[in-house]
Amino acid sequence: MKFDGKRVLITGSSRGIGQAAARVFHSLGAKVAINGRSADSVANGIAALGGGKRIIPALGDIATVKGCEEAVRSAVEGLGGLDVLVNSAGIGDVRPLLDCDEAMWDQVLNANLKGTFFCIRAAYPYLKASRGNVVNIGSDAG
């Protein structure tokens, strides 16, 4: 597979599964936007991939609509468009049922469901223009 020149935003790519996906896309020639909640996490994610011209930051907290929009906007501006959106950001809070509270539940749903939906919504016009794709990733915590 070759992704030469393809523009890819991977949410949650400052570490974990998203970081691994970013490494693969980058190794196949893609330009990759690295997303995380903090500037430090994004910088660390970029450094872990070795930096370079084909890796750009796309800061944004995917658990919020504003964060989704910011991440997509940064990616589109930095990459010059968007061909692939990989929704990898997510959290898993595995606890016994009776230890779960509303705040924990809201946090999980906001990152894992709301973030996926609103990233797709923000990316849709750019993906439509490029006839691009969306890839949604889940972990065993799902």
Image (cartoon, rainbow, N blue to C red):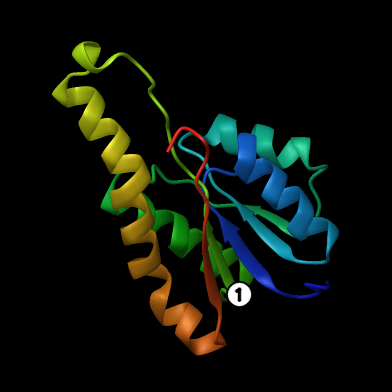
Question: As drawn, which residue projects farthest toward the left?
Answer: 102
- Depth order, front residue of 112/141: 141
Taking 142 as reference, is 39 left or right? right
Left or right: 52 as drawn, with respect to 8? right
Element under label 1? loop
- Looking at the rendering, which quadrant does residue 17 occupy? top right
Residue 25 pos. (x, y %) = 74, 59
Q: Is residue 15 visible in the rendered structure shown here?
A: no
- 44 lies above or below 131: above
Q: Indicate whether 42 appears above or below 28.
A: above
Residue 22 point in image, percent of width and height: 70, 51
Residue under label 1, please give it: 80
The image quarter in which residue 97 lies:
top left
**Residue lying at 27% horizontally and 40% vertically, measured from the top left:** 109
Q: Name which residue type carries label 1.
A: Gly
> x%, y% of residue 43?
64, 36
Q: Residues within 10 Å of mark 1 (few under 14, many from 20)?
A: few
Q: Is residue 48 above or below residue 59?
A: above
* On-image quarter of the N terminus: bottom right
